[in-house]
Image (cartoon, rainbow, N blue to C red):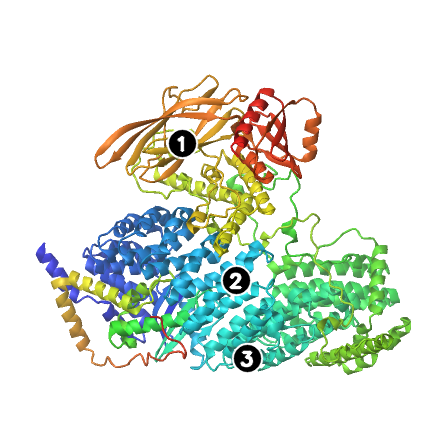
Amino acid sequence: MIKAILIFNNHGKPRLSKFYQRYSEDTQQQIIRETFHLVSKRDENVCNFLEGGLLIGGSDNKLIYRHYATLYFVFCVDSSESELGILDLIQVFVETLDKCFENVCELDLIFHVDKVHNILAEMVMGGMVLETNMNEIVTQIDAQNKLEKSEAGLAGAPARAVSAVKNMNLPEIPRNINIGDISIKVPNLPTFK
Amino acid sequence: MALKMVKGSIDRMFDKNLQDLVRGIRNHKEDEAKYISQCIDEIKQELKQDNIAVKANAVCKLTYLQMLGYDISWAAFNIIEVMSASKFTFKRIGYLAASQCFHEGTDVIMLTTNQIRKDLSSPNQYDTGVALTGLSCFVTPDLARDLANDIMTLMSHTKPYIRKKAVLIMYKVFLKYPESLRPAFPRLKEKLEDPDPGVQSAAVNVICELARRNPKNYLSLAPLFFKLMTSSTNNWVLIKIIKLASILHFVYRIRFGALTPLEPRLGKKLIEPLTNLIHSTSAMSLLYECVNTVIAVLISLSSGMPNHSASIQLCVQKLRILIEDSDQNLKYLGLLAMSKILKTHPKSVQSHKDLILQCLDDKDESIRLRALDLLYGMVSKKNLMEIVKKLMIHVDKAEGTTYRDELLTKIIDICSQSNYQYITNFEWYISILVELTRLEGTRHGHLIAAQMLDVAIRVKAIRKFAVSQMAMLLDNAHLIASNTQRNGICEVLYAAAWICGEFSEHLEEANQTLEAMLRPKVTTLPGHIQAVYVQNMVKLYASILQQKEQAGEKEAAQEITQLMIERLPQFVQSADLEVQERASCILQLIKYIQKLQVKEVPVAEEVIALFAGELNPVAPKAQKKVPVPEGLDLDAWINEPPSDSESEDEKPKTIFHEEEQRHSRHRQPEIDEEELARRREARKQEQANNPFYIKSSPSPQKRYQDTPGVEHIPVVQIDLSVPLKVPGMPMSDQYVKLEEERRHKQKLEKDKKKKKQKKEKRGKHHRHNSLHTESEEDIAPAHHVDIITEEMPENALPSDEDDKDPNDPYKALDIDLDKPLADSEKLPVQRHRNVETLKSPDSEVPLVEKKSKKPKKKEKKHKDKERDKGKKKEKEKKVVEEEEEEEKKGEDLDFWLSTAPPTAPTPQPQKSSKHKKKKHKKEKEEKSKDKKKSKKKSHHSEEEPPESVQNGTLEDEPLPPMSSYRLLAENPYIKMTYDIQGNLQNDSQVTVSVIFENKSTSFLKSMELNVLDSLNTKMLRPEGSSVHDGIPVPFQLPPGISNEAQFVFTLQSIVMAQKLKGTLSFIVKNDEGSTHEKLDFKLHFSCASYLITTPCYSDAFAKLLESGDLHMSSIKVDGISISFQHLLAKICFHHHFSVVERVDSCASMYSRSIQGHHVCLLVKKGENSVSIDGKCNDSTLLSNLLDEMKETLSKC
């Protein structure tokens, strides 16, 4: 089982938090802080597994994480998950994000956390892996987006326009902070296909 | 109206959306909290509007704020509103918010039930999908119960997208509502072979999670998984299956023991595809899991395969390559796998000690921790000191308290494992513990303290040394307790004070220690430590007093009393209640002593009597294991229960620290002085004979003089080299050296002896290389270490369940899945409540149904109760059936494992048939016992285990399947089979279970069963109905479905078999319309059905036969070809007998009728015939029984 999925940046700012076990909001923040603390002090070239998160349940659990440019993707899992399998899953997740957002960067995650949640929901459900095939995930997401667009219909158009105007007012938004080289893979680790 | 809508949508454009909110927060870095509270106010306004789009937008923003740590549970109702929006866009927002913040405590969650049900059945697959996803995060027991059936329907949805989600969510439903597991399991199993790989993977996922918790229930799936393993191409699925395979294999081994000949076959069967996978896969993850499982299998093949150690070695070698790899992930995983081998083959891992110690220096903490784990299993008597020494160096170097704390706990774990098995020198260990107290800022002070206490209490021989060390610690307490607030290490002072006080007779300079304990600085320590100080300084005081009085130094004794009186007031002023109370109590006591001293009355004996008595360690579970004496009801009130208002005031409040309560002393109050003196003397003697005690003594020579013979012990010269009194000086190293020297000496001595022996036995060519390969058994402990085992109460109840957590949510899922379903186990289906007017004869059903008409709340309560009951029943059954199941599964696996085609009818293996017999017996017993309560159960007497059919290898089933269900009647629509069981509780009732099987393609409903009562036998009808009314069957039958109903009959006499005529009427409904049909039947009550399998001991049996008031009769049947076991099994099964004793081809059997007739049989088998002699209270019953038996046997 996956106990939690966290995404935060190099400064520990949460970009997504998904807990598959009930924790109070305060505990959730503590977990995020603690996890960030544990993960951020690790060198780049050490292993991607980490034990000893105190808050998020017992000795059976493990943190499996990957670091892409400015973002940490952390999965907290128990012993029924395969370590290398989860690493691959993170890779699939990031590649899917890259596909859905077209060159994903941290800002995409900042402003569209709901979309990230929707993508994640197609991969992991209730702490169990639902789908590992990227094409299948993207197909479902596209279909849902289409449905959403058709529902918005005409009324959606002005809203989108306004939103575009609002974005224009903020020229400082940099669009090119890429999430980094998502093709960094753990050596010897072909992904699931 | 339209205008309003347009206006609304225009307004909306200028509302803040999620992006605006995020942007706003980023622009208000300085006053973020203020800005957000402003936003929350806005959101509250938005939520008040009617426009659902505005609400959805607000909820979307709330979800973001939740991530930042803001509690949004106040908006739960609004979230539900958004969830119920008709548009998918909004619905998704609502469900996302719900999944982030709803939980079991959310009170409005029950309002969602109908909305979710509606969404689940929505024509839009994404509505369903989003509902499933959301539900998976917040499902509660109530939701699970109410929606289980809907979700189960979705498992067969046409779209794989829905199917896979429905399958996956079932796991959550099972967790919350365990009763759903059995009804849903067949379909779940079906999904393992779903054409869609996603669905398949989901099913594998769920079953793996289930099997991980209760693997033994899933053994029967092994063949199916095996098939998947060889056929699947999805790596994710394969990894899961392989992980499961190793679990199942492991369980299999435990269940059937390493001796079963089956076992290597299973192993081989697994290894082959695994090695194939290893060769073919390119995914490292899969490869690693395969290697892992191969290891697991190889480990468990420890017996029966001669070359397994070579294979283990090979695996270890491969892992070594992984560990040496530059990729840190592989290194980590290699170590992880290594630790698995370590558990069973420590020797093969121990040879890689170098590599693992090297990993301790790795820069990666994860890897270091893994290596530490491995060390734990690698220690031996020989290398313990060396390894701990290395770890101590790491402790000094370690940066970061977490890792250092981890090291500390590991050191303690390593040393204390299996009751200090590897410690040869406890002085060394104590000094290690003392060294560890120098760690600053560790959280584990209490761990060290606990170890000190444990060692000092349990290793008698070490007490003297321990006391001297502890006295030193107390003396240097200021070093340890320098900053008490954040320092957990001061906990060791607790142990130190206690040890010094309790074993004060070993203290050399008690005065000095007492002085140290009375320092003003002590008052800065935490309260619970001070309390221990106070208590133990009195112990010290008492022993000093005695010493002085014995020596006749009255003034010194008075001085010490004066010192106490001067210093104690500082504790009397303590803010800590416990300290204050103890101190003031003791102060008064000492003042009184002073008065006596002034009068020159000797007081020491009486003071010391306060603390007399040996303290024995008590096992932590001792209290729990004290058997409750007969007739003691702990729940009963001793006095009249107080009224509510009273109890409120009298509620005990915990005022004192827990620690103090824990250490309350167990004393034996009545020990006379003589006994004490004797014990003390004995102890002194024991210690005097031990040379290792001399070191801490200030004047060792003195002691030697009064203990003759000690001088020969060669260790004496060493004691000068141990500077015990230097605080803070690491000493353990010296012990290592000492130990080495000692071992060396021992070795030399041994070699000498050996040489002597060799000289004596000249002829031997074989030479021992004992100089280099000293096995650890050779190392004798430094001194006689007498580890006192922990005490247990007399007649403690042995139980293995000590460690099980009663609150484990997975325990409820420990459900046998192989039993066929009973009709009471259906998932609750939402339906109108108008059909429940029928009254079934079964005692429980009407009760439930009556209740269900009452308001909903009550229903819920009752259901809960029922659930509890169900669980209890399940448990009861479990106990009895455990063995039986085991057998069954063993057989199934046997079929699957036997690759060779079934050979010609092999002679029955004795053992298995015996087991089988036992099984029948058990089944019967249980059936009769549980009959009344359990409706579900009756089903399982149907012998054929369903999964053996599925395996398709029924051919060599050891015993032909026997079913006690006989055909009642049959027509093209329906088939009825029945079985009759006696009722132990009621001597004039039997229960008839009828299985109705719909053979047609139509729907059968309104079934009604009626019989023509005879004078003797009557069907039990609900009150108020006439004898001509039929009893409605409490279910309907869809095509191809079978179900069971039970009917109770009352009888007057049971000595004769009876036949009753009856009719089943039912309505057949199909596309063309519905027709009314009837089926006549004859219900045959054989005499055997009045018997209840009752076990009987041979002595009771003999007495019964001797009593002489039994009638006798006998029969003989010729032409019997079946084996004797087989024959007995038949009699047991069909005629409800149990075997009392069996000698060769002769057996005595016993049974009892529901009206208490004893029936005894003596069965003898000749060449081709069987003779049965029977004795019974009633001759008619006996002759009828024997006739029935004759009929059964003649069919063989």
Query: Which of these two is toward me, B222 or B1049?
Result: B222
Q: Residues within 10 Å of mark 1 (few under 14, many from 20)?
A: some
**Which mark, residue B267?**
2
User: Please, what secondary structure does the residue beneath circle 3 have?
Assistant: helix
> What amino acid type should be assigned to the residue bearing mark 2?
Gly
Mark closer to the chain start, 3 or 1: 3
Residue A88 lies in quadrant: bottom left
Mark 2 or 3, nearer chain start: 2
**Residue B312 horizontal side relative to residue B753, left or right:** left
* Circle 3 crowding by C-alpha within 10 Å: few under 14, some 14–19, many from 20: many
Pointer 2 and pointer 1 on the same chain = yes
Dot 2 and dot 3 residues touching (CB under 8 Å): no
Q: Where is residue B860 drawn, in percent x and y?
A: 39, 41
Instruction: Please say if A125 is above or below B627.
Output: below
Say which quadrant the N terminus of chain B sits in.
bottom left
Q: Which residue is at the front of the view, B673 or A182?
A: A182
Q: Which chain letter goes with mark 2?
A: B
Question: Are both tags, 2 and 3, on one chain?
Answer: yes
Q: How many marks?
A: 3
Task: Give x and y (percent) for residue B6.
Answer: 10, 60
Badge 2, how many Cα within 10 Å: few under 14, some, many 20+?
Answer: some
Residue B529's spot in the image, x, y percent?
64, 65
Marks 3 and 1, how far apart at CA = 68 Å
Q: Quadrant of residue B628?
A: top right
| Residue ID for mark 3 | B359
The chain that hosts pointer 1 is B
Extreme residue in the left direction:
B3
Q: CA distance from mark 2 to mark 1?
A: 51 Å
Callout 3 amino acid: Cys
Q: CA distance from mark 2 to mark 3?
A: 33 Å
Q: Amino acid at mark 1?
A: Pro
